[in-house]
Amino acid sequence: MLQLSHFNRRSIKGDIFGALTSTIVALPFALAFGVTSGAGASAGIYCAIITGLFASIFGGTNQQISGPNTGLTIAMVAILTSFIAQSPEHGIAMAFTVVSMAGVFQMLFGFFKLGKYFTLISYPVISGFTSGVGILIILSQITSLFGKPLADLSFSSSIFTSTNTLLGLVCLAVLFVWPQKFSRVIPASIVAVIGATLFYIFSDSAIPVVGAISSELPAFNFPTWQGDLIGEMIKSALLIATLSTLDSLMTSLTVDSISNDLHNSDQELVGQGIGNIIAGFFGALPGGGATMRTVTNLRAGGTTPLSGILHALFILAIVLWAGEYTAYIPVAVLAAILTHVGISIIDWNFLKRVHQIPLFSVALMISTMVMAVIFDLITAVLISAFVANLVTIRRLSEIQLDNIKLLTAQDALHLPIYEKELFTELNNHVLLLNISGPIGFGVARGLKQSVSKLDENKALLIDFTDARFVGITSTIAIEEIIMSYQTQGRKILLSNICQRVRDDFNKLQLFDKVPREQIFNTRIEALYYLKNQIQP
């Protein structure tokens, strides 16, 4: 969050240069995302202004530049199309109400400190998600580049001879071949926009253009909803909130790695949420952290939230005094810019190494990508994250099962010599169930199976010397083992229970199932107790 300490002479120069540079990079993208969304270029521009301003003031990442991005734009296209189809009169207003609702959800994510959980998604899921978004953005630009939807393309020579298509393909080529060293001075996207605009002005070609952006500030839109669509509005808002959160926090992690700084995830979500609430009120696209623009700001000298604030104000100044000139920008160049973005964000590095990556990770990445394209982004992420977590839990459970050992005297080599001697003496009367490390719910079944075939003539000593956490499911499994022993009249003892585990056991009244004299502070006490029990 912006603080007075951020304003100082040492940083303000870098913040100004960072803001100017990121503004140059952001303008073409804001225009392109606005046009692609169907809401108009101004929706993308004011997203960059509003979310950029408020996320910088209230966010938790010093150098973050916020604005429209690929995933959010694709999601917004689907949301606008759906609500307009279901309610032609109020569909647009409801779609932007969804944006404000998404901001509220993001703020709740931050207030309930959920930020850290959004960064725990496995890499194959993120890779498949971003690659799916890349494919979707490429598909969304087919009509703008070729003048026809994908289904109607035959890729005959006539398609590639139209002026609009040739211009778009030339701009796309420029974006790919423009030298990286020159991009530090003037980004390839600016070169493409300027070149395409000059071509339009001097060629008199009848090609689609963006149109002028009004110099008037956008009007305030009151939230609008419809009873029968409220469920879909909530679902759509959660989608926007999730996508914005993922984009923002992933960008924040990128900033941390470059600047050796640490962001505040929950504060960042609050800032992004405030920005999206206000963006929805003024008919702007939803926004989130923009990695390319943020890194540009950082590399150009931006170090504090002031750079993000100035970035938003610079874009506003350009709109107010030069918005009319967007009337000369061809749509084809914006389509080329977004097609380049779509191609670039596909995780080619992962795809090139599929033969080196475990089969499950490859399948998870590809299935996420396919689901994102065929179904929708939120379905792809939820299903893939669920499957990935199940597999992770299974693998962790296998590791944790190694921490559960059923031992005889011959197996208990790790015991101190005096305990081992006593254990050997009692070998025909007791088995030791040694539990160590954290025991989660995934090992409950294995815990019960480990004692299901015990010798009925032997007592069971459950030792928790190295157990620092026992989950609720495993606690219940232990309780079931105790009850089974009690029913059969067999002796069961507990030892070395740390305070944390003891507190958890107390909550479930586990100790009520075991006689107090059979609960011991140390393992040696339990063994001496058994020795005294069997002596005549």
Image: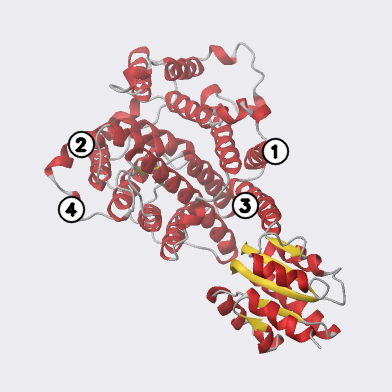
The image position of residue 459, as x and y in percent, is: 79, 77
- Which residue type does callout 3 highlight? Leu
Can you tell which mark lies on residue 363?
1
Q: CA distance from mark 4 to mark 1?
A: 48 Å
* Residue corresponding to mark 3: 382
Q: Which residue is mark 4?
A: 5
CA separation, marks 2 and 1? 45 Å
Report helix, strand or loop for mark 2.
helix
Can see residue 91? Answer: no
Q: Nearer the viewer, mark 3 or mark 2?
A: 2
- Which label is found at residue 14? 2
**In this view, the mark in front (4 or 3):** 4
- At label 1, the amino acid type is Ala
Q: Are marks 4 and 3 in contact (CB under 8 Å)?
A: no
Instruction: For label 2, count other residues whose C-alpha is less than 10 Å away and answer few (under 14), some (14-19) or many (20+).
Output: many
Residue sitting nearer the eye, 311 or 200: 311
**Residue 217: percent from the left, percent from the top?**
28, 47
Crowd tier of the residue under label 3, counting other residues whose Cα lies within 10 Å: few below 14, some 14–19, many 20 or above: few
Residue 390, picture quadrant: bottom right
Q: Residues within 10 Å of mark 1 (few under 14, many from 20)?
A: some
The mark that comes first in sequence, 1 or 3, is 1
Task: Say which of 516 and 263 sits in front.
Answer: 516
Q: Earlier in the sequence, mark 2 or mark 4?
A: 4
534 sits to left or right of 434: right
Q: Residue at x 76, y 75 (%)?
A: 460
Q: Residues within 10 Å of mark 4 (few under 14, many from 20)?
A: few
Name the amino acid, label 4.
Ser
- Discs 2, 1 touching: Cβ within 8 Å: no
Residue plotted at (74% across, 81% down)? 531
